[in-house]
Image: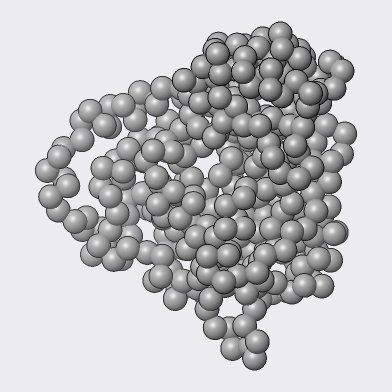
Amino acid sequence: MNYLDRNEFNFPPSPKVVEAIKSFDPMTLCFYTRIYDQGKKSVVSVRLSELYGVDEDRVLLTYGGEDMLKNAIHYFLTTDTGAQTPNKTILIPQFSWWYYNRVASECGGHFEMYPLHEKDDTFAYDIDEVIAYANRVHPRMLLLASPNNPTGNCLSPDDITRIMQSIPADTMVLIDEAYASFISSDTDYIAPLVNRFDNLIISRTLSKFYGLPGLRCGFGFIGRGHEQFLSYVNKYLGYNRFSEAVALAALDSDDYYRGVAADMQWGRELYAEKLGSRPGFKVYRSVANFILIKYPAACKEALQAALASESYKIKFMTDPGLESCVRITLGRREQTQAVCDIILQNT
């Protein structure tokens, strides 16, 4: 089966990752790390501190990006802020990952959705609208996804800065950047943002760009003054030492993954060229490892059957407003070509 429905990685791991796995010494697993004797949490957090220019003590490590979201949302929606009435409201984007809603509900939180707007061949945040919404509702948390899943649109550093400057200072802002590395390698904006805004968390992962969802390694960065949250998230006895070795190899393989990203760009262009001008279709611009495509809804059953017969699985959207869309993971070139051909032949 060709799984192109959950934004996973359909390419081989980098040669450095493969070598790290082959050369890992099993005896390493018999001992805890000793890096906490130096006041550090992990060899990975040290490396991330060097790469991103953020102090190591404000680097977050979690069991995938999912765990980052759960830790942050559960903590900040349940921690007493001293207010007479606890604030358990989180704002999340419309047309976004359903998991955001569930995590908030798990801890008794209340979520509200702010709009995303379809504009030409993309979806977009209206920054002024987000700011106005946050000031009107005054939530405990504001969640931004950049790029957003499933729409594939993103925020610029200037957009983030304007939002942070204009919303209540006691609203924690969590930016899910799981897909942020596919189009741009620029990370220079992260350190200035988390150094300037204490109420900011930027969440990333090795699952998407680095193609290791099975490793379950998430990371992020937080503003100053959250020692209690850091204690809540961090692991005193360290992290999975096998995962650490593989993570370091992945972080040292940027050139390899840039090559994979180039293949994904080829896929974006193919879908746009072959499907973009066909009646009933709309190919949305994406800066992630997936693409959202509107298709003639009457063809749904025939298309599902044709894909299944060729052992391909893509995501048929059911979100209100996106029922006539599919989200397709950008895989290897032969996978992309095959899916494109199946769509052309069955619509």
Q: Is residue 184 left or right of residue 243?
A: right
Residue 268 in the image: above or below residue 50: above
Residue 232 percent coordinates (x, y):
41, 70
Of residues 125 and 15, the one nearer the viewer is 125
Name the image quarter holding the C terminus. top right
Where in the figure is residue 39, as x and y percent of width and height? 30, 66
Q: Residue at x 62, y 83 (%)?
A: 86
Q: Nearer the viewer, residue 316 or 36?
A: 316
In the image, residue 212 sits, relative to residue 205, either above or below, namely: above
Q: Residue at x 39, y 45 (%)?
A: 216
Q: Where 28 sits versus 184, above or below?
A: below
Is residue 322 toward the left or the right of residue 258 in the image? right
Residue at the (39%, 26%) spot, across then down: 13
**Residue placed farthest to the bottom in the image?**
84
Q: Nearer the viewer, residue 201 or 320?
A: 320
Report whether 254 appears left or right of 300. left
Q: Is residue 184 above or below residue 241?
A: above
Residue in front for this viewpoint, 263 or 113: 113
Q: Quadrant of residue 101?
A: bottom right
Residue at point 56% right, 18% down?
308
Q: Position of residue 110 (x, y in %)?
A: 65, 69
What is the count of numbered marks? 0
